[in-house]
Amino acid sequence: MTVYKQILKTITPLDEMILMMPTASAIICAEETVPIVTANAKFYSLFNSSPEQEISYLNADSADRLRISKRFRHFAQDKKSFETEFHIGEDSTEGKWIKLQASYYASIHTMDLFLCCFHDVTAEHSGSYEQERDSIKIQENVLYDSLTGVWNLEHFFDVVNQRLLESNEMFQMIALDLDKFKYINEYYGRASGDMVLKVIAARLLNVFGESAAIARSYADEFYICIQKETITKEEIDALVYAQIQLENGEAVKVSIKLGIFSYDAGSKIYTGHECMDRALMACEKIKESHGRNYMIYTTEMEEKMHRENEMEDVMEQALEQGEFVVYYQPKFSLETEKLVGAEALVRWNSPTKGMVSPGIFIPLFEKNGFIVKLDFYVYEEVCKFLRGLLDQGYDVVPISVNVSRVHIETTDFVEKLLHVVNKYKIPYKFFEIEMTESAYGVENENVIQVVNQLKSYGFPLSMDDFGSGYSSLNLLKNMPIDVLKIDKEFLGETETSKRSREIIRMIVEMSKAIDIQTICEGVETNQQAEFLKNIGCDMVQGFLYARPMPEENYIEELQKYKTAQI
Protein backbone atom coordinates (compact mmCIF):
# COMPACT_ATOMS: atom_id res chain seq x y z
CA MET A 1 0.00 0.00 0.00
CA THR A 2 1.41 3.38 -0.99
CA VAL A 3 2.13 6.18 1.48
CA TYR A 4 -0.71 8.13 -0.16
CA LYS A 5 -3.28 5.43 0.63
CA GLN A 6 -1.93 5.22 4.15
CA ILE A 7 -2.82 8.91 4.40
CA LEU A 8 -6.34 8.19 3.10
CA LYS A 9 -6.87 5.65 5.87
CA THR A 10 -6.86 8.60 8.27
CA ILE A 11 -9.66 10.29 6.29
CA THR A 12 -11.86 7.38 5.12
CA PRO A 13 -14.90 9.54 4.26
CA LEU A 14 -12.85 11.24 1.54
CA ASP A 15 -12.25 7.93 -0.27
CA GLU A 16 -15.96 7.17 -0.12
CA MET A 17 -16.80 10.67 -1.41
CA ILE A 18 -14.52 10.25 -4.44
CA LEU A 19 -16.16 6.94 -5.36
CA MET A 20 -19.62 8.55 -5.31
CA MET A 21 -18.76 11.62 -7.42
CA PRO A 22 -20.62 11.79 -10.80
CA THR A 23 -17.60 13.06 -12.76
CA ALA A 24 -14.19 11.51 -13.34
CA SER A 25 -12.55 12.50 -10.04
CA ALA A 26 -9.38 11.88 -8.06
CA ILE A 27 -7.31 13.09 -5.13
CA ILE A 28 -3.90 14.26 -6.35
CA CYS A 29 -0.85 15.21 -4.30
CA ALA A 30 0.99 18.43 -5.22
CA GLU A 31 4.38 16.84 -5.84
CA GLU A 32 6.70 16.94 -8.82
CA THR A 33 5.48 13.61 -10.27
CA VAL A 34 1.81 14.58 -9.70
CA PRO A 35 0.89 11.31 -7.93
CA ILE A 36 -2.68 9.97 -7.81
CA VAL A 37 -3.81 9.21 -4.24
CA THR A 38 -7.21 7.71 -5.09
CA ALA A 39 -9.73 7.88 -7.95
CA ASN A 40 -13.24 6.71 -8.91
CA ALA A 41 -14.35 4.39 -11.72
CA LYS A 42 -15.17 7.20 -14.14
CA PHE A 43 -11.57 8.46 -13.77
CA TYR A 44 -10.15 5.06 -14.76
CA SER A 45 -12.57 4.84 -17.69
CA LEU A 46 -11.56 8.28 -18.96
CA PHE A 47 -7.90 7.30 -18.84
CA ASN A 48 -8.50 3.82 -20.38
CA SER A 49 -7.26 2.08 -17.27
CA SER A 50 -8.61 0.17 -14.26
CA PRO A 51 -8.12 0.15 -10.48
CA GLU A 52 -6.14 -3.06 -10.85
CA GLN A 53 -3.63 -1.34 -13.16
CA GLU A 54 -3.51 1.64 -10.76
CA ILE A 55 -2.33 4.84 -12.45
CA SER A 56 0.45 5.99 -10.12
CA TYR A 57 0.76 9.51 -11.54
CA LEU A 58 -1.19 11.85 -13.78
CA ASN A 59 -1.15 10.28 -17.23
CA ALA A 60 -0.32 13.46 -19.18
CA ASP A 61 2.39 14.16 -21.72
CA SER A 62 5.67 14.67 -19.86
CA ALA A 63 5.88 18.40 -20.73
CA ASP A 64 2.29 18.93 -19.53
CA ARG A 65 2.89 16.92 -16.37
CA LEU A 66 5.82 19.17 -15.42
CA ARG A 67 3.75 22.28 -16.13
CA ILE A 68 0.78 21.01 -14.11
CA SER A 69 2.97 20.00 -11.16
CA LYS A 70 4.23 23.58 -10.98
CA ARG A 71 0.65 24.82 -10.87
CA PHE A 72 -0.30 22.39 -8.11
CA ARG A 73 2.67 23.48 -5.98
CA HIS A 74 2.00 27.14 -6.72
CA PHE A 75 -1.68 27.09 -5.77
CA ALA A 76 -1.02 24.91 -2.72
CA GLN A 77 0.87 27.86 -1.22
CA ASP A 78 -2.30 29.95 -1.13
CA LYS A 79 -4.78 27.04 -0.74
CA LYS A 80 -6.59 28.02 -3.94
CA SER A 81 -8.30 26.38 -6.91
CA PHE A 82 -7.28 26.39 -10.56
CA GLU A 83 -8.08 24.79 -13.89
CA THR A 84 -6.02 23.90 -16.94
CA GLU A 85 -5.97 21.55 -19.94
CA PHE A 86 -3.52 18.86 -20.98
CA HIS A 87 -3.06 16.11 -23.58
CA ILE A 88 -2.84 12.34 -23.12
CA GLY A 89 -1.84 9.74 -25.70
CA GLU A 90 1.31 8.51 -27.36
CA ASP A 91 0.67 10.17 -30.72
CA SER A 92 0.33 13.94 -30.77
CA THR A 93 -2.31 13.67 -33.54
CA GLU A 94 -4.49 11.29 -31.50
CA GLY A 95 -5.26 10.83 -27.83
CA LYS A 96 -7.46 13.16 -25.78
CA TRP A 97 -7.56 16.69 -24.45
CA ILE A 98 -8.54 16.73 -20.77
CA LYS A 99 -9.76 19.69 -18.71
CA LEU A 100 -8.56 19.54 -15.09
CA GLN A 101 -10.42 21.46 -12.35
CA ALA A 102 -8.45 21.33 -9.11
CA SER A 103 -9.56 22.56 -5.65
CA TYR A 104 -7.24 22.60 -2.66
CA TYR A 105 -8.48 20.05 -0.08
CA ALA A 106 -6.02 19.74 2.83
CA SER A 107 -2.41 19.39 3.97
CA ILE A 108 -1.76 16.04 5.66
CA HIS A 109 1.65 14.89 6.84
CA THR A 110 3.26 17.84 4.96
CA MET A 111 1.56 16.73 1.71
CA ASP A 112 -0.82 19.10 -0.09
CA LEU A 113 -3.89 17.31 -1.47
CA PHE A 114 -6.20 18.54 -4.25
CA LEU A 115 -9.68 17.30 -5.12
CA CYS A 116 -9.70 17.11 -8.94
CA CYS A 117 -12.40 16.69 -11.58
CA PHE A 118 -11.59 15.71 -15.17
CA HIS A 119 -13.58 16.28 -18.38
CA ASP A 120 -12.97 15.07 -21.94
CA VAL A 121 -12.82 18.26 -24.04
CA THR A 122 -11.26 16.71 -27.17
CA ALA A 123 -14.24 17.84 -29.28
CA GLU A 124 -13.50 21.46 -28.38
CA HIS A 125 -9.93 21.19 -29.73
CA SER A 126 -10.36 21.44 -33.50
CA GLY A 127 -6.92 22.88 -34.29
CA SER A 128 -3.60 21.11 -34.62
CA TYR A 129 -1.84 19.66 -31.60
CA GLU A 130 0.89 22.31 -31.85
CA GLN A 131 -1.61 25.18 -32.07
CA GLU A 132 -3.55 23.92 -29.07
CA ARG A 133 -0.38 23.48 -27.03
CA ASP A 134 0.77 27.01 -27.96
CA SER A 135 -2.63 28.38 -26.95
CA ILE A 136 -2.37 26.76 -23.53
CA LYS A 137 1.18 28.06 -23.11
CA ILE A 138 -0.06 31.58 -23.81
CA GLN A 139 -2.69 31.15 -21.09
CA GLU A 140 -0.03 29.88 -18.69
CA ASN A 141 2.14 32.93 -19.39
CA VAL A 142 -0.54 35.04 -17.72
CA LEU A 143 0.98 33.73 -14.48
CA TYR A 144 4.57 32.81 -15.29
CA ASP A 145 7.65 34.38 -16.81
CA SER A 146 8.19 32.37 -19.99
CA LEU A 147 11.99 32.34 -19.71
CA THR A 148 12.66 31.49 -16.06
CA GLY A 149 9.43 29.80 -14.97
CA VAL A 150 8.98 32.03 -11.91
CA TRP A 151 5.93 34.28 -11.64
CA ASN A 152 5.40 37.37 -13.72
CA LEU A 153 5.13 40.74 -12.00
CA GLU A 154 1.37 41.15 -12.09
CA HIS A 155 0.70 37.75 -10.56
CA PHE A 156 3.45 38.27 -7.97
CA PHE A 157 1.79 41.38 -6.58
CA ASP A 158 -1.68 39.80 -6.69
CA VAL A 159 -0.45 36.96 -4.47
CA VAL A 160 1.77 39.11 -2.22
CA ASN A 161 -0.97 41.65 -1.55
CA GLN A 162 -3.33 38.83 -0.61
CA ARG A 163 -0.78 37.25 1.74
CA LEU A 164 -0.05 40.55 3.46
CA LEU A 165 -3.77 41.12 4.03
CA GLU A 166 -4.43 37.67 5.45
CA SER A 167 -1.34 37.39 7.69
CA ASN A 168 -0.02 39.04 10.85
CA GLU A 169 3.47 37.58 10.43
CA MET A 170 6.85 39.07 9.46
CA PHE A 171 7.70 39.16 5.75
CA GLN A 172 10.99 39.77 3.97
CA MET A 173 10.76 41.65 0.67
CA ILE A 174 13.87 41.35 -1.48
CA ALA A 175 14.86 43.17 -4.67
CA LEU A 176 17.63 41.32 -6.51
CA ASP A 177 19.65 43.03 -9.24
CA LEU A 178 22.30 41.44 -11.47
CA ASP A 179 25.10 43.99 -11.72
CA LYS A 180 26.41 44.63 -15.25
CA PHE A 181 24.14 42.00 -16.77
CA LYS A 182 24.24 43.91 -20.05
CA TYR A 183 27.95 43.06 -20.25
CA ILE A 184 27.16 39.33 -20.03
CA ASN A 185 24.68 39.61 -22.90
CA GLU A 186 27.09 41.58 -25.06
CA TYR A 187 30.24 39.55 -24.33
CA TYR A 188 28.88 36.00 -24.05
CA GLY A 189 25.71 36.34 -26.15
CA ARG A 190 22.02 36.54 -25.33
CA ALA A 191 21.66 32.75 -25.03
CA SER A 192 24.25 32.75 -22.24
CA GLY A 193 22.50 35.69 -20.61
CA ASP A 194 19.22 33.76 -20.67
CA MET A 195 20.94 30.77 -19.12
CA VAL A 196 22.28 32.95 -16.29
CA LEU A 197 18.75 34.22 -15.56
CA LYS A 198 17.39 30.65 -15.47
CA VAL A 199 20.14 29.55 -13.07
CA ILE A 200 19.49 32.53 -10.78
CA ALA A 201 15.73 31.75 -10.76
CA ALA A 202 16.45 28.10 -9.89
CA ARG A 203 18.86 29.19 -7.17
CA LEU A 204 16.23 31.46 -5.64
CA LEU A 205 13.78 28.56 -5.49
CA ASN A 206 16.45 26.35 -3.96
CA VAL A 207 17.43 28.92 -1.30
CA PHE A 208 13.96 30.12 -0.30
CA GLY A 209 11.81 27.11 -1.18
CA GLU A 210 8.54 26.57 -3.03
CA SER A 211 6.57 28.66 -0.54
CA ALA A 212 8.41 31.85 -1.51
CA ALA A 213 6.77 34.26 -3.94
CA ILE A 214 9.38 34.85 -6.66
CA ALA A 215 9.01 36.91 -9.82
CA ARG A 216 11.20 38.19 -12.59
CA SER A 217 10.61 41.90 -12.76
CA TYR A 218 12.65 43.27 -15.65
CA ALA A 219 15.52 41.89 -17.72
CA ASP A 220 17.91 41.38 -14.82
CA GLU A 221 15.79 41.99 -11.70
CA PHE A 222 13.95 39.54 -9.47
CA TYR A 223 11.48 40.20 -6.66
CA ILE A 224 11.14 37.81 -3.70
CA CYS A 225 8.65 37.74 -0.82
CA ILE A 226 9.12 35.22 1.99
CA GLN A 227 7.24 34.82 5.25
CA LYS A 228 9.91 34.67 7.95
CA GLU A 229 11.46 36.76 10.71
CA THR A 230 14.76 37.55 9.02
CA ILE A 231 17.15 36.67 6.18
CA THR A 232 20.15 34.64 7.31
CA LYS A 233 23.74 35.35 6.32
CA GLU A 234 23.88 31.87 4.76
CA GLU A 235 20.92 32.71 2.49
CA ILE A 236 22.51 36.00 1.45
CA ASP A 237 25.89 34.36 0.77
CA ALA A 238 24.22 31.64 -1.31
CA LEU A 239 22.93 34.35 -3.66
CA VAL A 240 25.49 37.16 -3.84
CA TYR A 241 28.51 34.94 -4.51
CA ALA A 242 27.43 33.38 -7.79
CA GLN A 243 29.63 31.62 -10.33
CA ILE A 244 27.72 30.09 -13.23
CA GLN A 245 28.99 27.52 -15.71
CA LEU A 246 27.94 28.30 -19.29
CA GLU A 247 27.24 25.65 -21.92
CA ASN A 248 30.61 26.35 -23.59
CA GLY A 249 32.38 25.48 -20.33
CA GLU A 250 33.27 29.03 -19.33
CA ALA A 251 32.56 30.13 -15.78
CA VAL A 252 30.90 33.53 -15.42
CA LYS A 253 31.16 35.43 -12.15
CA VAL A 254 27.86 37.19 -11.61
CA SER A 255 27.71 40.12 -9.20
CA ILE A 256 24.36 40.19 -7.40
CA LYS A 257 22.99 42.96 -5.21
CA LEU A 258 20.13 42.56 -2.74
CA GLY A 259 17.89 45.21 -1.22
CA ILE A 260 15.93 43.90 1.78
CA PHE A 261 12.86 45.29 3.54
CA SER A 262 11.51 43.58 6.68
CA TYR A 263 7.78 44.08 7.12
CA ASP A 264 5.39 43.18 9.92
CA ALA A 265 2.13 42.39 8.14
CA GLY A 266 0.28 42.84 11.42
CA SER A 267 0.76 46.60 11.07
CA LYS A 268 -1.23 46.62 7.78
CA ILE A 269 0.47 49.82 6.61
CA TYR A 270 1.94 48.96 3.22
CA THR A 271 0.85 47.18 0.07
CA GLY A 272 3.11 44.76 -1.73
CA HIS A 273 4.13 47.50 -4.17
CA GLU A 274 5.03 49.87 -1.33
CA CYS A 275 7.06 47.16 0.41
CA MET A 276 8.96 46.41 -2.78
CA ASP A 277 9.60 50.12 -3.36
CA ARG A 278 11.50 50.12 -0.08
CA ALA A 279 13.47 47.01 -0.99
CA LEU A 280 14.37 48.68 -4.31
CA MET A 281 15.42 51.80 -2.44
CA ALA A 282 17.82 49.72 -0.36
CA CYS A 283 19.13 48.03 -3.51
CA GLU A 284 19.73 51.42 -5.12
CA LYS A 285 21.60 52.59 -2.00
CA ILE A 286 24.21 49.86 -2.53
CA LYS A 287 25.62 51.89 -5.44
CA GLU A 288 26.70 54.52 -2.92
CA SER A 289 28.47 51.93 -0.73
CA HIS A 290 31.52 50.48 -2.45
CA GLY A 291 32.10 46.78 -1.83
CA ARG A 292 28.63 45.94 -0.43
CA ASN A 293 26.38 43.28 -1.92
CA TYR A 294 23.27 43.82 0.16
CA MET A 295 21.56 46.62 2.04
CA ILE A 296 18.74 46.51 4.58
CA TYR A 297 16.17 49.28 4.34
CA THR A 298 16.23 51.98 7.04
CA THR A 299 13.86 54.82 7.93
CA GLU A 300 16.56 57.28 6.83
CA MET A 301 16.11 55.96 3.30
CA GLU A 302 12.39 56.60 3.55
CA GLU A 303 13.02 60.16 4.70
CA LYS A 304 15.25 60.59 1.66
CA MET A 305 12.50 59.18 -0.56
CA HIS A 306 10.01 61.69 0.85
CA ARG A 307 12.46 64.55 0.24
CA GLU A 308 13.00 63.37 -3.30
CA ASN A 309 9.26 63.06 -3.93
CA GLU A 310 8.77 66.60 -2.64
CA MET A 311 11.50 67.89 -4.97
CA GLU A 312 10.07 66.02 -7.95
CA ASP A 313 6.65 67.48 -7.25
CA VAL A 314 7.93 71.07 -7.56
CA MET A 315 11.00 70.86 -9.85
CA GLU A 316 9.19 71.87 -13.05
CA GLN A 317 7.48 74.78 -11.34
CA ALA A 318 10.76 75.82 -9.70
CA LEU A 319 12.44 76.00 -13.11
CA GLU A 320 9.60 78.07 -14.57
CA GLN A 321 9.68 80.50 -11.63
CA GLY A 322 13.43 81.09 -11.79
CA GLU A 323 14.33 79.41 -8.50
CA PHE A 324 17.42 77.86 -10.10
CA VAL A 325 20.27 80.36 -10.34
CA VAL A 326 23.73 80.07 -11.83
CA TYR A 327 26.78 80.81 -9.68
CA TYR A 328 30.34 81.13 -10.99
CA GLN A 329 33.48 79.87 -9.27
CA PRO A 330 36.67 81.48 -10.66
CA LYS A 331 39.73 79.52 -11.74
CA PHE A 332 43.20 81.01 -11.25
CA SER A 333 46.62 80.55 -12.83
CA LEU A 334 49.16 79.38 -10.28
CA GLU A 335 51.98 81.01 -12.25
CA THR A 336 50.44 84.49 -12.78
CA GLU A 337 47.78 84.42 -10.02
CA LYS A 338 45.31 85.88 -12.53
CA LEU A 339 41.76 84.80 -13.21
CA VAL A 340 41.76 82.52 -16.24
CA GLY A 341 38.33 80.92 -16.21
CA ALA A 342 35.26 79.98 -14.21
CA GLU A 343 32.91 77.06 -13.65
CA ALA A 344 29.15 77.54 -13.87
CA LEU A 345 27.38 75.89 -10.92
CA VAL A 346 23.61 75.68 -10.48
CA ARG A 347 21.99 76.53 -7.15
CA TRP A 348 18.37 76.02 -6.08
CA ASN A 349 17.01 78.93 -4.04
CA SER A 350 13.71 77.52 -2.78
CA PRO A 351 11.25 80.01 -1.24
CA THR A 352 10.27 77.40 1.40
CA LYS A 353 13.54 75.50 2.04
CA GLY A 354 16.17 78.14 1.24
CA MET A 355 19.32 77.07 -0.60
CA VAL A 356 19.07 73.35 -1.45
CA SER A 357 22.44 71.61 -1.68
CA PRO A 358 23.41 70.48 -5.20
CA GLY A 359 24.56 67.23 -3.58
CA ILE A 360 20.88 66.54 -2.86
CA PHE A 361 19.09 67.55 -6.05
CA ILE A 362 21.70 66.88 -8.78
CA PRO A 363 21.85 63.05 -8.21
CA LEU A 364 18.03 62.94 -8.13
CA PHE A 365 17.70 64.91 -11.38
CA GLU A 366 20.31 62.71 -13.06
CA LYS A 367 18.27 59.68 -12.01
CA ASN A 368 14.89 60.98 -13.16
CA GLY A 369 16.18 62.69 -16.33
CA PHE A 370 15.25 66.26 -15.32
CA ILE A 371 18.97 67.10 -15.43
CA VAL A 372 18.72 67.45 -19.22
CA LYS A 373 16.18 70.27 -18.97
CA LEU A 374 18.00 71.92 -16.05
CA ASP A 375 21.40 71.78 -17.75
CA PHE A 376 20.09 73.40 -20.91
CA TYR A 377 18.59 76.14 -18.75
CA VAL A 378 22.09 76.65 -17.28
CA TYR A 379 23.68 76.66 -20.76
CA GLU A 380 21.25 79.34 -21.87
CA GLU A 381 21.93 81.46 -18.75
CA VAL A 382 25.71 81.14 -19.26
CA CYS A 383 25.41 82.18 -22.90
CA LYS A 384 23.29 85.21 -21.95
CA PHE A 385 25.89 86.17 -19.35
CA LEU A 386 28.81 85.74 -21.74
CA ARG A 387 27.00 87.75 -24.41
CA GLY A 388 26.51 90.60 -21.94
CA LEU A 389 30.19 90.53 -20.91
CA LEU A 390 31.35 90.55 -24.53
CA ASP A 391 29.01 93.42 -25.43
CA GLN A 392 30.28 95.46 -22.46
CA GLY A 393 33.91 94.94 -23.47
CA TYR A 394 35.03 92.79 -20.54
CA ASP A 395 38.11 90.60 -20.77
CA VAL A 396 36.18 87.36 -21.18
CA VAL A 397 37.61 83.97 -20.10
CA PRO A 398 36.18 80.50 -20.74
CA ILE A 399 33.30 79.38 -18.56
CA SER A 400 32.93 75.64 -18.13
CA VAL A 401 29.55 73.93 -17.90
CA ASN A 402 28.85 70.44 -16.63
CA VAL A 403 27.67 67.75 -19.02
CA SER A 404 26.31 64.58 -17.46
CA ARG A 405 26.32 61.02 -18.74
CA VAL A 406 22.59 61.42 -19.45
CA HIS A 407 23.40 63.97 -22.18
CA ILE A 408 26.04 61.80 -23.79
CA GLU A 409 23.51 59.00 -24.21
CA THR A 410 21.04 61.21 -26.12
CA THR A 411 21.26 61.42 -29.90
CA ASP A 412 20.68 65.16 -30.41
CA PHE A 413 22.83 66.66 -27.64
CA VAL A 414 25.44 68.31 -29.89
CA GLU A 415 22.76 69.72 -32.19
CA LYS A 416 20.82 71.26 -29.28
CA LEU A 417 23.98 72.66 -27.69
CA LEU A 418 25.09 74.30 -30.93
CA HIS A 419 21.65 75.89 -31.26
CA VAL A 420 21.95 77.56 -27.84
CA VAL A 421 25.54 78.75 -28.26
CA ASN A 422 24.97 80.03 -31.81
CA LYS A 423 21.78 81.78 -30.74
CA TYR A 424 23.90 84.16 -28.62
CA LYS A 425 26.85 84.18 -31.04
CA ILE A 426 29.29 82.95 -28.40
CA PRO A 427 32.76 81.96 -29.70
CA TYR A 428 33.12 78.25 -28.93
CA LYS A 429 36.47 78.81 -27.19
CA PHE A 430 34.65 80.56 -24.32
CA PHE A 431 32.20 77.70 -23.71
CA GLU A 432 34.11 74.83 -22.08
CA ILE A 433 32.54 71.36 -21.82
CA GLU A 434 33.29 69.67 -18.49
CA MET A 435 32.41 66.01 -18.03
CA THR A 436 33.12 63.67 -15.14
CA GLU A 437 35.43 60.76 -15.79
CA SER A 438 32.45 58.38 -15.46
CA ALA A 439 30.69 60.18 -18.33
CA TYR A 440 33.76 59.75 -20.55
CA GLY A 441 34.10 56.24 -19.24
CA VAL A 442 31.02 54.98 -21.08
CA GLU A 443 33.42 54.26 -23.88
CA ASN A 444 31.16 53.31 -26.75
CA GLU A 445 30.86 54.62 -30.29
CA ASN A 446 28.26 57.24 -29.33
CA VAL A 447 30.49 58.76 -26.61
CA ILE A 448 33.53 58.88 -28.88
CA GLN A 449 31.45 60.42 -31.66
CA VAL A 450 29.99 63.13 -29.38
CA VAL A 451 33.36 64.06 -27.87
CA ASN A 452 35.04 64.24 -31.29
CA GLN A 453 32.18 66.36 -32.64
CA LEU A 454 32.51 68.86 -29.81
CA LYS A 455 36.27 69.02 -30.32
CA SER A 456 35.91 69.56 -34.07
CA TYR A 457 33.72 72.63 -33.45
CA GLY A 458 36.36 74.12 -31.16
CA PHE A 459 34.80 73.61 -27.72
CA PRO A 460 37.46 73.17 -25.00
CA LEU A 461 37.04 69.79 -23.27
CA SER A 462 37.88 69.03 -19.66
CA MET A 463 37.60 65.91 -17.57
CA ASP A 464 36.33 66.36 -14.01
CA ASP A 465 37.23 64.11 -11.05
CA PHE A 466 40.20 62.58 -12.85
CA GLY A 467 41.50 59.56 -10.94
CA SER A 468 38.20 58.68 -9.28
CA GLY A 469 37.42 55.88 -11.76
CA TYR A 470 39.15 52.86 -13.22
CA SER A 471 39.69 53.81 -16.84
CA SER A 472 41.58 57.10 -16.50
CA LEU A 473 44.72 56.30 -18.48
CA ASN A 474 42.84 54.61 -21.29
CA LEU A 475 40.65 57.71 -21.64
CA LEU A 476 43.69 59.95 -22.01
CA LYS A 477 44.85 57.77 -24.86
CA ASN A 478 41.55 57.80 -26.74
CA MET A 479 39.82 61.11 -25.95
CA PRO A 480 40.87 64.60 -27.22
CA ILE A 481 40.87 66.21 -23.75
CA ASP A 482 42.31 69.71 -23.17
CA VAL A 483 42.18 69.95 -19.37
CA LEU A 484 42.33 67.44 -16.51
CA LYS A 485 40.66 68.41 -13.26
CA ILE A 486 42.35 66.33 -10.57
CA ASP A 487 39.96 64.68 -8.11
CA LYS A 488 39.91 66.77 -4.92
CA GLU A 489 40.01 63.61 -2.78
CA PHE A 490 43.69 63.26 -3.71
CA LEU A 491 44.41 66.83 -2.70
CA GLY A 492 42.72 66.47 0.67
CA GLU A 493 45.21 63.73 1.57
CA THR A 494 48.41 65.40 0.35
CA GLU A 495 49.27 66.85 3.76
CA THR A 496 49.27 63.40 5.39
CA SER A 497 49.83 60.95 2.56
CA LYS A 498 53.05 60.74 0.55
CA ARG A 499 51.30 58.44 -1.94
CA SER A 500 48.65 61.05 -2.68
CA ARG A 501 51.32 63.70 -3.26
CA GLU A 502 53.21 61.43 -5.63
CA ILE A 503 50.07 60.48 -7.55
CA ILE A 504 49.22 64.15 -8.16
CA ARG A 505 52.85 64.87 -9.12
CA MET A 506 52.82 62.05 -11.68
CA ILE A 507 49.45 63.13 -13.12
CA VAL A 508 50.79 66.66 -13.65
CA GLU A 509 54.06 65.44 -15.23
CA MET A 510 52.23 62.99 -17.51
CA SER A 511 49.73 65.66 -18.59
CA LYS A 512 52.50 68.11 -19.52
CA ALA A 513 54.17 65.41 -21.60
CA ILE A 514 51.01 64.95 -23.70
CA ASP A 515 50.06 68.66 -23.85
CA ILE A 516 47.11 68.56 -21.47
CA GLN A 517 46.62 71.31 -18.90
CA THR A 518 45.86 70.49 -15.27
CA ILE A 519 43.66 72.12 -12.68
CA CYS A 520 43.11 71.04 -9.10
CA GLU A 521 39.84 71.80 -7.34
CA GLY A 522 39.10 72.01 -3.63
CA VAL A 523 42.20 74.08 -2.77
CA GLU A 524 41.64 75.40 0.75
CA THR A 525 45.09 76.00 2.29
CA ASN A 526 48.26 77.88 1.34
CA GLN A 527 50.21 74.66 1.87
CA GLN A 528 48.13 72.90 -0.80
CA ALA A 529 48.52 75.80 -3.22
CA GLU A 530 52.28 75.89 -2.68
CA PHE A 531 52.58 72.16 -3.29
CA LEU A 532 50.60 72.39 -6.55
CA LYS A 533 52.68 75.36 -7.75
CA ASN A 534 55.94 73.52 -7.04
CA ILE A 535 54.93 70.46 -9.09
CA GLY A 536 53.85 72.60 -12.07
CA CYS A 537 50.03 72.37 -11.87
CA ASP A 538 48.59 75.02 -14.20
CA MET A 539 45.38 76.16 -12.48
CA VAL A 540 43.56 76.01 -9.17
CA GLN A 541 40.01 76.37 -7.98
CA GLY A 542 38.78 76.41 -4.39
CA PHE A 543 37.73 78.36 -1.31
CA LEU A 544 41.27 79.66 -0.72
CA TYR A 545 40.86 81.79 -3.85
CA ALA A 546 37.12 82.27 -4.34
CA ARG A 547 33.81 80.62 -3.51
CA PRO A 548 30.99 80.16 -6.06
CA MET A 549 29.32 83.55 -6.48
CA PRO A 550 26.43 85.29 -8.28
CA GLU A 551 26.95 87.12 -11.59
CA GLU A 552 27.50 90.57 -10.06
CA ASN A 553 30.26 89.33 -7.75
CA TYR A 554 31.94 87.47 -10.57
CA ILE A 555 32.01 90.68 -12.63
CA GLU A 556 33.78 92.34 -9.69
CA GLU A 557 36.35 89.53 -9.75
CA LEU A 558 36.90 90.09 -13.48
CA GLN A 559 37.57 93.76 -12.81
CA LYS A 560 39.76 93.00 -9.81
CA TYR A 561 42.05 90.54 -11.58
CA LYS A 562 43.44 91.29 -14.99
CA THR A 563 42.96 88.06 -16.88
CA ALA A 564 45.69 86.16 -18.62
CA GLN A 565 45.77 83.27 -21.10
CA ILE A 566 48.10 80.46 -20.07
Image (cartoon, rainbow, N blue to C red):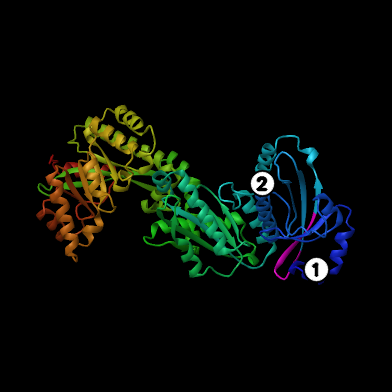
Percent x, y for residue 129? Answer: 70, 38
Is 9 rendered above or below residue 333?
Answer: below
How far apart marks 1 and 2 lie (CA) works out to: 31 Å
Identified at 26% across, 32% down, the residue is: 387
Q: Is residue 112 magenta?
A: yes
Q: Nearer the viewer, mark 1 or mark 2?
A: 1
Circle 1/circle 2 CB separation < 8 Å: no
- Compared across the picture, whether 202 is left or right of 83 comes to left
Residue 496 falls in image quadrant: bottom left
The residue carrying mark 2 is 140
The residue carrying mark 1 is 8
Q: Earlier in the sequence, mark 1 or mark 2?
A: 1
Quadrant showing the N terminus: bottom right
Seen from the viewer's position, the closer of residues 396 and 2 is: 2
Q: Is residue 450 magenta?
A: no
Identified at 62% across, 53% down, the residue is: 156
Identified at 45% across, 58% down, the residue is: 257
Q: Secondary structure at mark 2?
A: helix
Is 113 rendered above or below residue 478?
Answer: below
Q: Secondary structure at mark 1?
A: helix
Circle number at residue 56: none
Percent x, y for residue 507? Answer: 17, 52
Quadrant showing the C terminus: top left
Identified at 75% across, 55% down, the residue is: 81
Seen from the viewer's position, the closer of residues 142 and 448 is: 142
Where does the magenta region start and end? 106-116
Percent x, y for residue 21? Answer: 88, 56
